[in-house]
Image: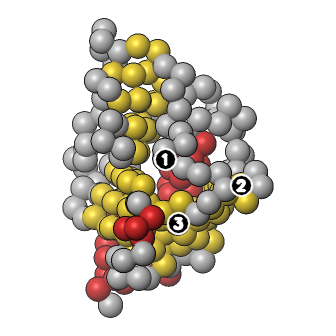
Amino acid sequence: MKNLLMMTGIAFLFLTGCASLSPTVKRTSRSVASTRTVWNAGNRSDSLKNTYRVLLKTPNNSLTGICILKRNGDEWRGAFISEMGAKAFDFTVTAGTCTLLNVFPAMDKWYVKKTIATDLHFLFNADNPEAAFRRKPERFEQDDSLVVNYGKKQLLAGPDGAIRLVNSRHDLLYELRKMDPDEIDR
């Protein structure tokens, strides 16, 4: 029941957020153009299962859990599972689109699914030159972080290994941290 209330709250907060969650990185004179990738070998394997700790923040709530991701040909397949063990949704990401599958009923609203799908498409295709973006994302390095801007979305790959996606239009913050194999077995 608690999980259902939390998921319903997140769906509601997609529409009602006012204050920005995280300040976005503004490009300064210290920044330099970059060709560095967000999804390097340390962050993602093309052949093995990838497991990440996930934090999804809205202005008034947060959801934590695990994302399991695996490459299957030209697409990535994954699942978001809450800390309580309930699956929020499955997804597939290709260069052209992201599709959400088996969505938790409280999140099964077109506007919630559309927002999450476009965010995940940008998150997992930020380094893909064949991805279906209307324009090329802006990339630069500043303060030891890689920053990728695309419209109202900003992706940050920090020196701490965390990958953060800020959607300032809907005041959402996604944070992924790769889990060590021995951490997964616990």
Up the image or down, 76 lies above or below 64; here it is above
The residue wearing badge 1 is 43
The reply to whether residue 12 is in sight is no
Spatial distance from mark 1 to mark 2, Cα to Cα?
Answer: 17 Å
Up the image or down, 149 lies above or below 123; here it is above
Q: Identify the disc placed on residue 57.
A: none
Q: Residues within 10 Å of mark 3 (few under 14, many from 20)?
A: some
The residue sitting at the right extreme is 73
Decide if residue 3 is on the left or right side of residue 148.
left
Up the image or down, 90 lies above or below 85; here it is above
Amino acid tagged 3:
Ile
Q: Identify the disc placed on residue 68.
A: 3
Q: Secondary structure at mark 1?
A: loop
The residue sitting at the top extreme is 29
Up the image or down, 169 lies above or below 127; here it is below
Q: Secondary structure at mark 2?
A: strand
**Near-viewer residue (184 or 80):** 184
Residue 35 appears in which quarter of the rendering? top right
Spatial distance from mark 1 to mark 3, Cα to Cα?
Answer: 13 Å
Q: Position of residue 53 (x, y in %)?
A: 38, 62
The residue wearing badge 2 is 75
The reply to whether residue 145 is in sight is yes
Spatial distance from mark 2 to mark 3, Cα to Cα?
Answer: 14 Å
Q: Earlier in the sequence, mark 2 or mark 3?
A: 3
In the rendered picture of this protein, how many numbered marks are placed on residues?
3
**Near-viewer residue (27 or 113):** 27
Marks 2 and 3 in Cβ contact (< 8 Å):
no
Which tag is nearer the camera, tag 1 or tag 3?
Answer: 1
The residue sitting at the bottom extreme is 1
Going 65% across and 36% down the picture, which residue do you hit?
128
